[in-house]
């Protein structure tokens, strides 16, 4: 778990395929009583924020940057909901932490670009959407059956393929064997974890994305709530979904979600073209060259928008890397 979470960690590449399976099978054997981050037992944090673990260690507040007011350009607003960084003693409180984080990202005043980019959504709309996953008690009850907040589909970690064909086939066979063994052992010895991993991800996505709704747009979170609403009975949830958009709202959402997807495709293209991180960061020694390239790409994009009947104001608002076509 720690290896997977460590940023820029390369230790996975030193492990054979069988070790991935063994490390994963050991995780359910650890009695996790709280959710948060791992600390030494004598860590300099408040005692009330420490939850017992194994000797010499404890579980404390989550260290992830999404829970802290420490990201450049992402001010937090805690007037509506206080900071909620854990540790959390159950799945319901864990999900509440995600939702509260979403509230903390929503500013007190509307963004000036909301009138230009409708899919972004107003402050009022974001607050309304965030209230919906908070009210989805049936979904929380469904998730609690798995008793694990980190529910992900089965996967294997594949590094570089061997150059030789024979070695590649042996490698693929080993991975396949590990995957099958892993699933059989989970099903037989830790069925709760197996059931959680097999759970329909439609149930999970509102909670995965609610903490970033202001950054990603209202259209992104709204789409997840619509998916839940349309499949409510199929997913085995009782009663009716509290989020019931009207046909007119669905038509408007369809247009806004298409705009959102277009922006994501543009961002992915720029990330690859500029060899930049998803948030626009680039190495300092490449700054000058990337500024020139970014402005060149923005100029081409601006011409394309104008030719299709769009405005320069809209083009500048759509550009993800820097204000008015220059890196942040």
Image (cartoon, rainbow, N blue to C red):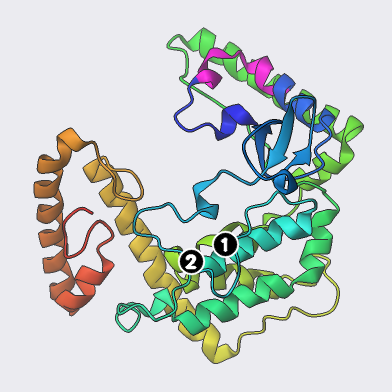
| Disc 2 + disc 1, Cβ < 8 Å | yes
- Mark 2, Cα crowd under 10 Å, few <14 / some 14-19 / many 20+, is many
As helix, strand or loop, the secondary structure at mark 2 comes to helix
The reply to whether residue 293 is in sight is: yes
Please say if 171 is above or below 301.
Answer: above
Tell me: 295 left or right of 237: left
- Mark 1, Cα crowd under 10 Å, few <14 / some 14-19 / many 20+, is many
Q: Residue at x 75, y 44 (%)?
A: 197
Tell me: 105 left or right of 141: left
Counting from the top left corner in percent of width and height, residue 302 is at 14, 67
Tell me: 78 left or right of 33: left
As helix, strand or loop, the secondary structure at mark 1 comes to helix
Report how far apart the C-alphas of labels 2 and 1 lie in the structure.
Answer: 7 Å
Bounds of the magenta span? 11-21
Residue holding disc 2: 105
Q: Main secondary structure of the magenta part?
A: helix
Residue holding disc 1: 101
């Amino acid at each position: 778990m720690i290896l997977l979470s460590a940023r820029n960690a390369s230790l996975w590449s030193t492990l054979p395929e069988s070790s991935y399976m063994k490390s994963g099978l050991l995780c359910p054997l650890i009695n996790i009583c709280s959710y948060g981050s791992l600390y030494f037992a004598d860590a300099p944090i408040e005692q009330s924020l420490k939850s017992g673990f194994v000797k010499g260690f404890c579980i404390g507040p989550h260290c992830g940057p999404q829970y802290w007011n420490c990201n450049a350009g992402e001010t937090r607003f805690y007037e509506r909901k206080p900071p909620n960084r854990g540790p959390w003693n159950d799945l319901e409180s864990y999900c509440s932490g995600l939702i509260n984080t979403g509230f903390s990202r929503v500013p007190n005043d509307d963004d000036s670009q909301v009138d230009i980019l409708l899919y972004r959504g107003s402050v009022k709309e974001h607050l309304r959407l965030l209230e919906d996953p908070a009210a989805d008690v049936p979904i929380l009850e469904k998730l609690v059956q798995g008793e694990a907040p980190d529910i992900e589909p089965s996967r294997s970690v594949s590094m570089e393929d061997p150059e030789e064909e024979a070695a590649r086939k042996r490698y693929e066979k080993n991975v396949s064997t590990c995957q099958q063994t892993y699933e059989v052992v989970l099903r037989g010895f830790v069925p709760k974890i197996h059931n959680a991993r097999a759970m329909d991800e439609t149930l999970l996505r509102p909670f995965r994305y609610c903490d970033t709704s202001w950054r990603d747009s209202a259209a992104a979170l709204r789409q997840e709530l619509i998916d839940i609403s349309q499949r409510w009975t199929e997913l085995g949830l009782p009663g009716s979904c509290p989020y019931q958009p009207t046909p007119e709202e669905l038509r408007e959402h369809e247009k806004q979600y298409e705009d959102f997807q277009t922006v994501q495709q543009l961002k992915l293209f720029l990330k690859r073209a500029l060899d930049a991180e998803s948030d626009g960061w680039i190495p300092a020694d490449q700054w000058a060259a990337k500024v020139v390239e970014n402005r060149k790409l923005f100029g081409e994009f601006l011409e394309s928008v104008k030719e299709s009947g769009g405005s320069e104001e809209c083009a500048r608002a759509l550009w993800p890397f820097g204000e008015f076509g220059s890196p942040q």
